Amino acid sequence: MRIRIAYLGAIALAPIAGATSADAFSDLSATFHTDAAMKTMKSDADFKAAWDAMSTDRQDAMKKECNDAAPSKPHAEFCVKMHLLGGNS
């Protein structure tokens, strides 16, 4: 019975866990933009400071997304700035 409950719990949580890690760009508006509509990027200094404050895992996820042509299109301005200021190593 405990195994069944654990199994059902894992199934119930799987979509939630996948949704939070599926989009590396999910918090761009607050971190790298001056407005919620994500129309205006922060200054280079603020962008670099925000980038440097992020974990390496988060940076790597964003780099991967920017290197993937399809997902990066809506975030092209961010990706260009990330490559210039954050590096792409």
Image (tube, helix red, strand yellow):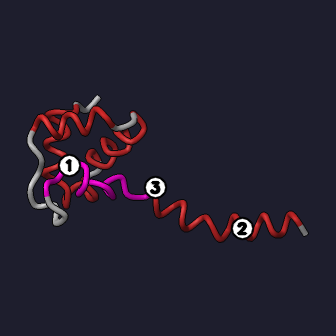
| Mark 1: amino acid | Phe
- Distance, label 3 to label 2, CA atoms, is 19 Å
- Who comes first in sequence, dot 2 or dot 1? 2
Image spot of residue 73 (x, y percent): 19, 58
Which residue is at the far right?
1
Crowding near the residue tagged with mark 1, few <14, some 14–19, many ≥20 C-alpha atoms within 10 Å: many
User: Of helix, strand and loop, which one carries label 1?
Assistant: helix
Image spot of residue 3 (x, y percent): 86, 63
Magenta region: 22-34
The residue sitting at 15% across, 39% down in the picture is 46
The residue sitting at 39% across, 33% down in the picture is 56
Tell me: residue 76, above or below residue 9. Answer: above
- Distance, label 2 to label 1, CA atoms, is 35 Å
Image spot of residue 75 (x, y percent): 19, 56
Judging by the rendered image, the residue that carries numbered circle 3 is 21
Residue 31 among magenta residues: yes
Judging by the rendered image, the residue that carries numbered circle 1 is 32
Tell me: residue 58, above or below residue 75. Answer: above
Judging by the rendered image, the residue that carries numbered circle 2 is 9
For residue 9, what is the image quadrant?
bottom right
Residue 20 among magenta residues: no
| Mark 3: amino acid | Ser
- Who comes first in sequence, dot 1 or dot 3? 3
- Who comes first in sequence, dot 3 or dot 2? 2
For residue 13, what is the image quadrant?
bottom right
Check the picture and name the quadrant holding the N terminus: bottom right
Crowding near the residue tagged with mark 2, few <14, some 14–19, many ≥20 C-alpha atoms within 10 Å: few
Q: Which of the pair 49/16 is nearer the observer?
A: 49
User: Of helix, strand and loop, which one carries label 2?
Assistant: helix
Check the picture and name the quadrant holding the C terminus: top left
Q: Which of the pair 81/89 is nearer the observer?
A: 81
For residue 44, what is the image quadrant?
top left
